[in-house]
Image (cartoon, rainbow, N blue to C red):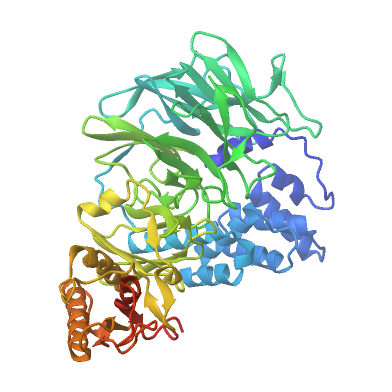
Amino acid sequence: MKMNTLFCFVLGFAMLHGQYKESKGDGYFFSYAYSDAIAAYERDLEKGGSLSPRQYLNLADSYFKTNKFEKATDIYLELFAQDSIMEGDHLNMLLQGLGRTSNKERLTTFLNDNKLDFSRELQENAKFNMELLTSKKNDEDHNYRVFNLDANSTQSDFSPAFYRNGLLFTSGRPLGKGESYEPMGEAYLDVFEGEIAANGQVAKVDRLNAIRDSDYHKATPYFSEDLNSIFYVLSNTLEGELEFDESGKNALSIGMQKIGGSFKFLWRDLSTSFYYPFYDDNTSRLYFSANLKDGYGGTDIYYVNTSNGQIMSAPINLGPKINTPGNEIAPYIFEGVFYFSTDVFYGLGGMDIYKANFKEGGFTIPVNLGKPINSETDDFGFIIKNHENGLQGYFSSNRAGGKGKDDVFGFFVDEKPGIKTFALNGKVVRLNNMQGVSNARIKVYGPGGELLLETLSNDRGDYSIEIPSQSKVRVEAAKDRFSIFSAIFEGEQIEAVQKGNLNIGIALYDDLVEEREGQKVVKLKKFFFGNGESKVTPDIAIELDKVVDFVERFPAVQLRIESHTDSQGSAAANFRLTQARSDAIKDYLANHGVPSSNILYSIGYGEDKILNNCKNGVYCLEMLHRQNRRSLIVILNDNILFD
């Protein structure tokens, strides 16, 4: 099953000597005889003996492997509380156990109470997918037709791959040689090919002769059209015999077979197994799964850069958006979407298939494909291609209704599978210099105004949001002393805005205001009305539009409009003129969307507040008189606006 099929075939080669000789359970456990291991460990406890932490963990794993999830979870919780040897994959099994034996609230509570033990990405992924699967358990928007292949055997059949007009897959079925690999009781894994019929079934199945012969494992093929080569994993051998490391372990390497040409090892380590190679023709990256030291749990997905398949870089981990404390396998890319399989705790059960979109520097939140592709059992090894007016694909599963341990299933679907989501990526920037704004609050509201998601931008201002698909969303972004960004997307805008990055500009309040005459005012270029006039000219309108924008960004501001003249002319005439100018400004702002509640006063001061000595009876140059002609937009609640 999933990794278990491949793991058991591989790890059983290790010549295990057993750390704790005092229990027969150890031998059973490392031979995958989990029921016998449980019986042996329980006998030790009944006789008054004690188990080491490692043996206790083996017992928990044995319970878990035999679906005794409640007993397994009790032990995992006890070991976790002792802060002993619980890490990586075992943390995932603990969480899986909580999910299988408890309600969602208990699992959520455990995650919240132990946030420091889990990455931010894992918590985000879990929250999103748990809510998604709870709110929409079936992918109702797609018309699936899923079917079991007639070509499946009573043994393990998994890891399908397209091969020209046919299909490759891995199988443990015996074909003539009669070898049997213990403890699985199957033949060594081999790669088979068959022809794809119009109905999706696969016929004329036979061992693939295009790759070099071996008496041992050959598995998980992928065919690259660009390189005309098959990538696959195979047992490490030396002169036709299994090759072991110093501890007695035989591992799987990655090989590349040119069709009609030579074979070469791409990645070979006697102590480390590599699984599920996938070569991306577009980027020349070779993806694979492995349990390396820098991983996040069990097997993680990595890639290496290549030149025509030849490895040119060290392995690069895909990071915590994709890799988890569980096991990630079977990478596959189709039309810019990254598909993979994981047994992380927040799925439907066992191993599930997920998809994620590429974004700059990483991935969006992986989304569970939902039913019927995923089930409560193990589902993995997903591939897909365009077919007529829809899509055709295959995956592996050990769900009920199959013929063997793992079966290959086919499907047809009208459009790309997966529960639909609304995903946005971009950067929050400060408008005056377009620099990223960190810790900006981004909120997403649903059609009824309900808050669906809240997150923060990172240190560079980058943000990423993803929610279940909606007919209408409102996106807001804000930060203390910054303006509020708000945008509504509906209809065709929903699809359009997701095709690229949405950069959100917010303005810092202090960039838009200044101190003048002992008070805070909206920062504007100085403008002048015509001589003796109160008409808003196009030049004045340009500046007043900045006030409209300012109020939209800071809707809680309270303003006073004030206008002033010089001392020339009568005081009464100057007062009437400035009042008319302030009223004209108020009317313009109101006509352009500024609510009346934002403008508390519009006042004309005439010549009462001369800024220099150019008072009545004093001779002044025109430039000095001009200094006194001004209009200001005063912010009355500046001192309490951000309290």
Query: In the displayed image of the protein, which residue is found farthest to the top?
Result: 260
Q: 430 left or right of 26? A: left
Left or right of residue 282: residue 473: left
User: 440 or 204: which is nearer to us?
Assistant: 440
Give x and y (percent) for residue 316.
Answer: 60, 38
Residue at 43% from the left image edge and 40% from the top image edge: 338
Residue 218 visible: no
Residue under the point 77% across and 35% down:
15
| Residue 565 rendering spot, x and y as whole percentages | 27, 81
26 lies above or below 407: below
Is 14 in front, or is 211?
211
Relative to 211, 368 lies left or right:
left
Looking at the image, residue 384 sits to the left or right of residue 533; the answer is right
Location of residue 133 in the rendering, given as x and y in whole percent from the top left corner: 38, 59
| Nearer to me, 567 or 77 | 567
Instruction: Answer above or below: position of 341 versus 135.
Output: above
Q: Is residue 323 visible?
A: yes
- Where is residue 155? Give x, y as percent: 50, 33
